Amino acid sequence: MNTTLATFSICTYLASTLFIARDTHQNRRQRTPLYLAWAAVCAHLLYIAIAFQQSNSFNFSFINTASLISLIVALLLLMATFNKPVEKLGIVIFPIAAIMLALELNLPNKPHLLHTHNWQMSVHILTSIIAFSLLNIAALQAVLLAMQDQQLKSHPPKRFIQSLPSLQTMESLLFQMLGTGLFFLTISLVSGFIFIEDLFAQHLVHKTVLSIIAWIIFSCLLLGRLRYGWRGKTAVRWTLTGFILLLLAYFGSKLVLEIILHR
């Protein structure tokens, strides 16, 4: 059952990506890619729910966490398409979700179950994942914004860039995503300081320090936007810098310990 769900989800993620690429090439906007993506997300979610039920907890190993984050990113993107023209981000997000799910399905990994933690730790972990997912979308938005800014200076810009919303709309969407992501990152850090006995213990210090620096960067960027009207290349650089720090904080040690050292 789970293998069938995962295979269906992977295929529909990739089909949605192909339809988005086709519609971009033909300079049109259709709902079919979104319907396929919703089917993929629902199957992906059901796959994770069944795995959760079988283990009576969620497995927070490196690959499983990456798969969960890719699912949340895809789901948040689809929810955003109800009132924002951001479906073109799916051309990057949906293949990544398919790859992460395929890795989860085929690569064995040591389980790190959630039920070994209390509810306070669960809140901290889940808000961290939501924050990372939102800021992941913001980072992709920043990359597209940089591409759009560069391409609009050439004549004519490529078809993919022409299919994106206006530069002003793209910037507005970027800062909305950053604001929401910062909100959840704040909850994650606060819950960590309240509920974790020693947040600066040896195995946590790099995560804590990098996450705090990323929080400062995102906060300064939003403050600079409000007070000084920061935009364009400044917004892109600060967004990508903050996201890279979070990426190292969330996945750096997991990658080394679980994938390289097999611990």
Image (spheres, rainbow, N blue to C red):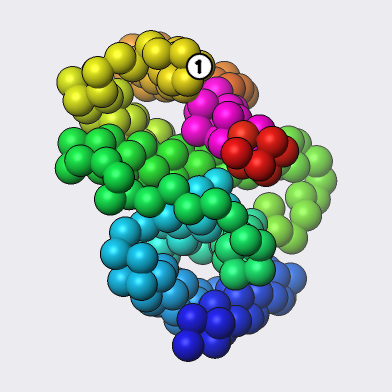
Start-end of magenta stretch: 243-256
Res. 180 visible in picture: no
Q: Residue drawn at (66%, 62%), measured in percent from left and top?
A: 107
Picture quarter containing residue 200? top left
Position of residue 189 relative to residue 161, above or below, is above
Rendered view: 83 above or below 16: above
Q: Which of the 4 quarters of the picture holds residue 27? A: bottom right
Q: Name the one closer to the observer, 101 or 179.
A: 101
Q: Position of residue 152 (x, y in %)?
A: 71, 41
Q: Where on the picture, by quarter, is residue 95?
A: bottom right
Residue located beneath label 1 in the image: 206
Residue at (20% x, 25% y) in the render: 195
Assign the C terminus to one quadrant of the image.
top right
Disc 1 residue type (three-letter)? His
> 224 or 238, which lies in front?
238
Residue 254 visible in the picture: yes
Residue 92 shown left or right of residue 57 in the figure: right
